[in-house]
Image (cartoon, helix red, strand yellow):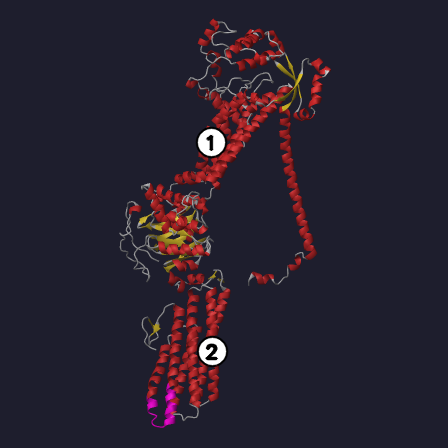
Amino acid sequence: MTEAHDSLLHYHRDLEELERTVLGMANQAEKMAGMAVEAVTTDNVELAREVVSLFDEVHAKHLDVHRAWTELLVRNQPLGSDLRKMTVLLQLNVTFERMAAQCSNISKIAIANTGLPMVENIVEKVLEMGDLVRPMVRVSINSYIRKDLDEARLLPAMDEPVDRLNANMYKEVVSVGGHPEMLEWATKMLMVSRALERIGDQAVDFAEQTAFLITGERAWFDEAGLSKAGDGDDG
Amino acid sequence: MSPRLALQEKDYSDLFPEGEDLQRQIGGRRRREGLARIFFMVVLIVAIGALATLLYTIINAAFGMTAIVNTVEPDTIVAEMGHDPEESGLSDLSYDELVMVLENSVTNNVGRRLERDQRFYEDRLVFENETTWAQICASSQAPTGCDAAPRDKAGVLQLVNERVVEPDVVETWELIPSLLEREVIEAEILSAEFQAAHPGARPEFRAWLNWQFVTSPQSPNPETAGVRTAILGSLWVIAITVIFAFPVGVGAAIYLEEFARPNRINQLIQTNINNLAGVPSIIYGMLGLAILVRVLEPITSGSFLGEGGSATENGRTIISAGVTLGLLILPVIIIASQEALRAVPNSMRAAGLALGATKWQTIRKHILPAAIPGVLTGSILATARALGETAPLVVVGASTFIITDPSGPFSKFTVLPIQIFQWTSRPQDEFRNIAAAAILVLLILLVVMNATAVFLRNRYSRSN
Amino acid sequence: MMTGEIRTTEGDISERSRSDQPAPTDEQGTAAESTAPPGVIVTEDMSVYYGKFRAVADVSLSFATNEISALIGPSGCGKSTVLRSLNRMNDLVPGARVEGSVRYHGDEIYDKDVDPVEVRRKIGMVFQKPNPFPKSIFENISWGARINGFRGSKSEMSDLVQEALESAALWDEVKDKLQESGYSLSGGQQQRLCIARAIATKPDVILMDEPASSLDPIATLRIEELMLELKNDYSIIIVTHNMQQAARVSDRTAFFNVKLNDQGMRTGRLVEYTETSQLFTSPTVQETEDYITGRFG
């Protein structure tokens, strides 16, 4: 069998570069998540500000990616796996930008919360969520790079504890009691929890896109990570 | 690794000429091109020159000054008939007077022959006696004079000219000298020595190719001989040739190109046809002689139809000649038609068949009409060639001396090329002149045929 | 690939109506195809030989009614050969031989007692390079009808010609010059004329061999638009080397590829045949994926 000769070499190279750029946004988002969680749990305003400026970069890069994507589409008529990759990258461009936006929101809360007294429980829970969410992003990135469907299907299971922690965060806030400054801090931390939960969901979205790229089937993951078509009412 | 990368390792660019080198190289190429063009032009000029020389030679011989001596001067005859030669000429004599002149001058035998060809009077015979006349007219081989209308004055006048005045061309000159040095020639003719050798000689500019030449029959006398018999013979023969060869040839070509499958047998047939196109024409003559003249004599002599008398009761007839020439040009017509059919693009056949038409429907309506220009060109060119064939017809038995016009496909005949051949082999000068005139007639016929080919071809390709 | 049990019937192919299709029993169900009725033309293990050379091997396809099916693949893959075999135009190539079965409405068209002329009346063809006859526009269309025994009056023939030209989206452009030669039209118009000519004989199926590849882009798009209109009344099978064209017009696409066998012969084979959007988004066979993403050997 003769070697396959790539007749669309230039297009494929450009496509790969676009892919790398988009994955770079994901890497960035993962890093920013760590930094944001640290900033908000250690009252590190400088770190928070760094995250916000990193978001500006990602925000701008989102537009660059959009332009590059459109140009690739104009010049080429992608088919097959190229076509699937193009649709996936367009989607992920949005997903990662939103991920980075959540990190930026967390950092902005850190800046707003500066000086306020922290609640030990809540800090613990937030740190726990951070430790759960960051591996989700990592795993989703890896499953994409390795085109590993089984790995991708792990995401819903990883998301479950995050969802639970977020759902229970309300109770923590309520139990803070009457101290006004603490209450202020705790209420804002509720938004941090929400942001982290969103990042987790976006990682699951990423994994669903990966599954589409690999199999060509469009479906939402159920809790077991198996595909199901139809309405997904998980946010 | 891509081929482009491999090439970049060695720089070939300095192996190409640049700058002045390049100019020189281009100059060399242009010079060679110039030489080629000159060569082809020279070749063309040589070809044109050869053709021009041919035409010049022929035309030169067909027109020119002649010195004519009358055996008996017309004036003498007029005077003998009791008229004043100053006031009247031969043509002013009455019909009866002219007949009387003939009576006085020609021998009885000649006179009887003339009368048998055509009578002079409706009511009386001049040379023949009544009983003999009645006998021969009643016999199975009655001559034409028995039924034909009697002669008219113009005819008798011509006879008197031919047989009594008997103009004799004693010397001829070519056209160019005749035009440029006319007075010199006239002076020469009227000079004393010339008159001593040929008393009564007078100069006359003669166009050997004239209407009379075309309409007169053969005659042993070059001054009065004409090509009418030969032209009619040629036309009859060609007609038979075309009627036979065209449908057969085109039909065979259609079969070979469109229907025959490419197996061994058809390959063999094709090869043979191609080879037959190159067979020397005299062999076709021998074929014609053996089969058409001898074996198929009952058919070709027309005796199965009860045609012709004993004089024509053999197979050396127009139909034999026509079919022989038809066979000669048949391979050429087949090949030309095949080429024309092949030139029709296959897309047309595909289009027709894809509509659910049969092969023949497609051929008849589309392929053949598209091929017609080529078919016609090839056929007419082949026919033009047949017009000029001499050897095979000599073998098949064209008469070299025949004065009666052909009356049908079963007549004896002669054709123009044979007539020309016969005349050029005669020693007298004058035969050269009329041979040249006959060649011009032949050339004119060929030009007309080719012009028809071009016309028909243009008409058919335009209507497509 | 779809194979179905199809009851063969005797009788005139051209009289067979489209409605009496027997229900298929499927032997190898592939998700999309097993519930589809057998198509207007069905091939089963069809191979085409030119002499000893096997141009295409073991093609089993079912072409659906009132759909456009596209055959794509690299050169030498046999797609044109397959197309020409569907209306026995391949018979014209000396040494061409078809093995296996090709059924039109259930009737085997390569049976000894089947007249190819009849087959071609019902399965028309349009060629890559437009080939109108060097006759008037009117006659181009009327001739096909006449040789197939059209029995109408002169005015009925005029109506037929007009209807054909309207269906081919050419009527408005030529209605005032029907007596002019077909050659006086532009390339795109000539091709539409050829399409009108093909549909004037009222066929069932129209085969198109790269119908737009010799036309400019605008003319190409007009032909494609026309195809999408025509599929309401006819079944269309097209061969195209332009994947985007196949993606634009066809409902189902068959991908052929050429393979070198151990004797060094290049034989074409059917690789995949499925819904067009499926084939161009997520083909199931790696060969197809390689071809459509430009990675072929």
Q: Predominant secondary structure in magenta?
A: helix
Residue type at tag 1: Phe
Q: Nearer the viewer, residue B227 or B38?
A: B227
Which residues fall within the magenta stretch? A171-190
The residue type indicated by label 2 comes to Val
Which residue is at the front of the view, C51 or C146? C146
Q: Are marks 2 and 1 in contact (CB under 8 Å)?
A: no
The residue that mark 1 highlights is: B246
Q: Quadrant of residue C224?
A: bottom left
- Depth check: give the residue in front, B421 or C275: B421
Q: What SS does tag 1 mark?
A: helix
**B188 over C245 or under it: above or below:** above
Q: Is residue C59 left or right of residue B6?
A: left
Q: Is residue B390 above or below residue A102?
A: above
C265 magenta-colored:
no
User: x, y percentage for residue C3?
Assistant: 32, 56
Q: Is residue A64 visible?
A: yes
Residue A173 magenta-highlighted: yes
Q: CA distance from mark 2 to mark 1?
A: 87 Å
Image quadrant in which the N terminus of chain C is located: bottom left
Q: Residue furthest bottom?
A: A179
- Discs 2, 1: same chain: no
Residue C270 point in image, percent of width and height: 40, 56
Q: How many marks?
A: 2
Residue C92 visible to an observer of this rendering: no
Dot 2: what SS? helix
Label disc, if present, on residue A58 of the rendered structure: 2
